[in-house]
Image (cartoon, grey):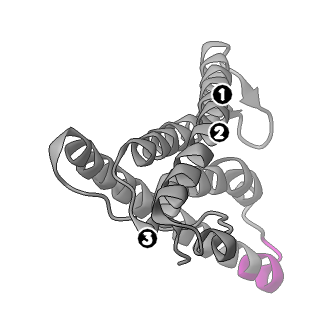
């Protein structure tokens, strides 16, 4: 989904791509670190009967959330979404463009609502100083913060794709 790099949409697209790429790199590093942590925990647990006690909560509530949420906009831009390409590919380009934009317009309110609600939940968690009790008292806000960041970028990406010139590659399978 390479968009045209001219005019205000091209400038915004370039900046958004840079932020999406940075978030994807961070997400990849988080997920690679998660794999190392889980592997070390498994070896430690089975070979030495000494599990890493914080591994499960850290992985489940923080690392996986960050790794997945931060990768959302890059994944969408790279074509990681559901498309019904078989039927649409046989339609005229004008009709494809309309279907692409209508689909995006239908998704935008849902994405915006998810962003808004997750921002509220994150704000509440920080404002109320919410913690999950365990070996370590885990601050809930730092678990949630990645969700509104990823959803904000994904919402901006879908909005930008709705406004920019249509390309047949938008409907192609990847």
Q: Marks 1 and 2: in contact by CB < 8 Å?
A: no
Could you tell me how far apart the alpha carbons at marks 2 and 1 are, in whole angstroms?
12 Å
Give the image quarter of residue 143: top right
Q: Image height check: is 19 above or below 122?
A: below
Q: Which element is circle 3 on? A: helix
The label number, if any, that marks residue 11 in the structure image: none
Disc nearer the start of the sequence (2/3) = 2
Tell me where the magenta segment starts and ends, as one range.
43-50
For marks 3 and 1, give the CA distance: 28 Å
Residue 29 in view, yes or no: no
The reply, left or right, for residue 174 in relation to residue 54 is left
Between label 2 and label 1, give the one nearer the viewer. 2
Q: Secondary structure at mark 2?
A: helix
Position of residue 171 measured from the top left corner of the image (x, y, whole percent): 53, 67
Does residue 117 lie above or below 66 as drawn? above
* Mark 2, other Cα within 10 Å: few <14 / some 14–19 / many ≥20: few
- Front residue (pair 119, 101): 101
Residue 4 is situated, as x and y percent measured from the top left of the image, at: 25, 57
As drawn, 165 above or below 129: below
Q: Which quadrant of the view contains residue 84?
A: bottom right
Q: Which residue is mark 2?
A: 106
Q: Which residue is mark 3?
A: 169
SS majority, magenta: helix
Q: Position of residue 112 (x, y in %)?
A: 59, 30
Instruction: Please report the residue visible at 56 percent of the width from the left and 66 percent of the height from the top.
Output: 31
- Marker disc for residue 113: 1
Residue 61, horizontal then vertical, whole percent: 71, 47
Callout 1: helix, strand or loop? helix
């Amino acid at each position: 989904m390479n968009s045209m790099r001219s005019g205000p949409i091209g400038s915004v697209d370039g900046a958004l791509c840079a932020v999406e790429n940075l978030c994807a790199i961070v997400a990849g590093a988080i997920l690679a670190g998660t794999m190392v942590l889980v592997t070390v925990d498994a070896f430690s647990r089975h070979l030495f009967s000494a599990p890493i006690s914080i591994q499960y909560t850290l992985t489940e509530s923080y690392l996986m959330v960050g790794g997945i949420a931060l990768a959302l906009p890059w994944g969408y831009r790279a074509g990681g979404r559901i498309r019904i390409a078989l039927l649409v590919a046989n339609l005229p380009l004008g009709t494809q463009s309309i279907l692409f934009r209508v689909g995006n317009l239908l998704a935008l309110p849902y994405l915006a609502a998810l962003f808004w609600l997750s921002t509220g939940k994150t704000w509440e968690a920080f404002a109320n100083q919410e913690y999950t009790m365990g070996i370590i008292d885990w601050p809930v806000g730092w678990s949630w913060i990645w969700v509104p960041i990823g959803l904000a970028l994904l919402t901006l990406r879908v909005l930008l794709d709705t406004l920019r010139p249509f390309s047949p590659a938008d409907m192609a399978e990847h």
